[in-house]
Image (tube, coloured by chain):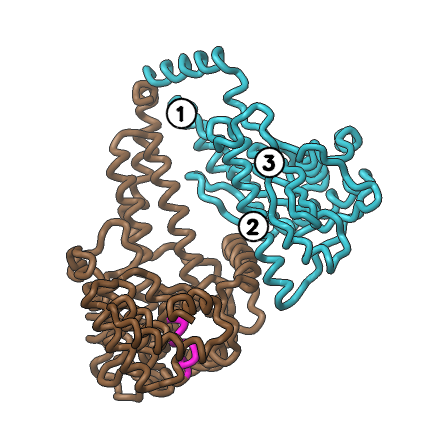
Amino acid sequence: MRYAFGYAILCLLLGCLSPSAMAQEKSAVRQGFALDPNSTKILLFRPKVTAGSQSTAGMFEPNADWTQQARDNLDLALAEAQQRLGNEIVGSVDVVGQQAESLAEYQSLFGIVAQSVIEFQFFPGNRLPTKKRKDAAFDWTLGPGVSALAAHSGARYGLFIFTEDQFGSTGRKIFQVFAAMGGVGITSGQHKGFAGLVDLNSGDLLWLNADLQMGGDVRTMEGARRRVAQLLEDFPGSTVALAAAAQ
Amino acid sequence: MRALLRGIPLVALALALFLVLPVSVSAAPAPAPAPADLPPYSPAYQPQGTDERGLWMWADEDERELRDSKFVINDPALQSYVASVLCRAVGQDRCRGVRIYLVRVAAFNANMSPNGTMQVWSGLLLRVRSEAELAAILGHEFAHFELRHSLAGFRKARTMTDIAAWTAVLGQYGATVQQAAIGSIYQFSREQEKQADLLSLKYAIQSPFSAQAAAHVWQRLMDEADATALGRKQRSRRYERVTFFSTHPTPLDRATYLADLSADAAAKPEGAESYSAALAKWLPEFLSDQLKLNDFGGTEYLLSSLAGEHWTAPLLFARAELYRQRGNPRDLVAAADFYRSALAADPELAEGWRGLGLCLMRDRQQAEGAAALKNYIRLRPQAADISMLQTMTGE
């Protein structure tokens, strides 16, 4: 109890001192970027989608059915959303040999770069020295080699999507209630996702949106629409149209 | 937290008792998984139930990534050779359910996913000495697959972490129960490893390979670990007992029970020659990976053990590189000798001339060194370091 009281005071103090410091930034757009009006073909890399439940102790239990539902729903919702923005989405068709290798490499590279942005730029307490200035540029790139991927698809941009949904199991929820009775806060369920847009000519990261507390139950079509609207928040082009559509 | 819990002692006690029970009977077998009619290796087997389907889905996603990874060794000949060893080890019907990926990592390991993805690391291929030894390890991995160990391990971990979580909230006597619950996950893993060893031995007894080979692998791995420890001035861990977090039995345990149980098996061929012939093309590459581990003692042991009575050119060259890498004046003298022996066996070994030249020049034998480097330049006119070496030879 003493600790809880101390913690509450600490939170209050921190809250008074810097209300914004506790908040994690969620998205950024490269300076001066606007979608090329002449070519809005977007290559969608195979989204990384996982859905499952969270056991009482918090272990992730993958669920094949939910994951398939989420994948199908998100694909549809994404196509709808981009169509509304006037963009054309093309899937990354199955490639073989050297192309497959380089596709896999860039997919991994994007994952690492995105993770670095989230850790070292979006999180204010942990910024790299070059990202500390108030108007620090959002300047990350996968390198110009990425243009080889564009050559086959004719796309101008590449879109990466990652979502992971852990739905709290019944056991977890009961556990949460009991823990709350003991004064311990335990979360049930975890829903994180990020999406990024890459210029397939230069390799520059144009826009990134990351959220570790996402809404929308991706197992349903409605939820997937809401999730996509959230993932594409601040997507270069029009956010208003998307938000309106999701309502 | 405790203060609040005292308000509900009866509920807490009841729950604690209820939760302690499953721990005390944890030695009994876990509830059987949903009865699946078919073994997981049968053609186009579909996983059953939420847990198994979830794990397979995960494994499928991982395999998509692994398939296109640059670490996968893209050599159809070696690939089909390793597959043929597996098929002879476990039988044609079983091995069709497995997809083998040879992965270039310089450590001794192989692993098996629940969906039939088998990874074999290059460090393992380097250390294994015969088809029989490779068969014993592939058989062990296959046994994990056949016995659905990932699934059982996943369920065990879930049950035990659940128990540990509840006891953490309940407080009283929590630590003891928690420790037992977490410990049982690792104990379960060790039991699975032993089961896989025993099933692998069963395969071996029915296969054309020697069943005694399995124990040899572990014996040599302990010797190598000792050599590494000695080189790094650490103590040997050979006789250490299993620790709380050990996922495997100790190598000494494994070597002992495998040797005991296979002692009476019929003597069958090891297939050492055919194995080294199949690996010959890759041996220099795998040795070069090993040299980068900065493990003088272990590498020296490994090279001597691979050479046995007969030092071949690639092994001599690797040993020379190892000594040149350490670079004491006496090492350079030894390295130069090894390079010369390697070159006597194979005068076209360009990198041998390069190493010899660098050793000699560093040892203040400019003329001889330059002559050796010129041989390298002649044999590898397109090499990346030619200009640098030409400045050294004064051309």
- Residue B379 place in picture, x, y as percent: 45, 80
Mark 1 → mark 3, Cα distance in angstroms: 28 Å
User: Does label 1 or label 3 sit earlier along the sequence?
Assistant: 1
- Residue A21 place in picture, x, y as percent: 51, 20
B152 or B289, nearer to the observer:
B289
Q: Is residue B293 left or right of residue A111?
A: left
User: Does label 3 or label 2 sit earlier along the sequence?
Assistant: 2
- Chain coloured brown here: B
- Residue A73 place in picture, x, y as percent: 70, 46
Residue A19 badge: none
Q: Secondary structure at mark 2?
A: helix
Q: Amino acid at mark 2?
A: Leu
User: Is residue A83 something one can see in this rendering?
Assistant: no
- Residue B7 place in picture, x, y as percent: 33, 19
Query: Residue sitting at 36 percent across and 45 percent down?
Result: B160
User: Does label 1 or label 2 sit earlier along the sequence?
Assistant: 2
Q: Is residue B138 left or right of residue A38?
A: left
Query: Residue sitting at 43 percent across and 32 percent down?
Result: A175
Residue A109 badge: 2
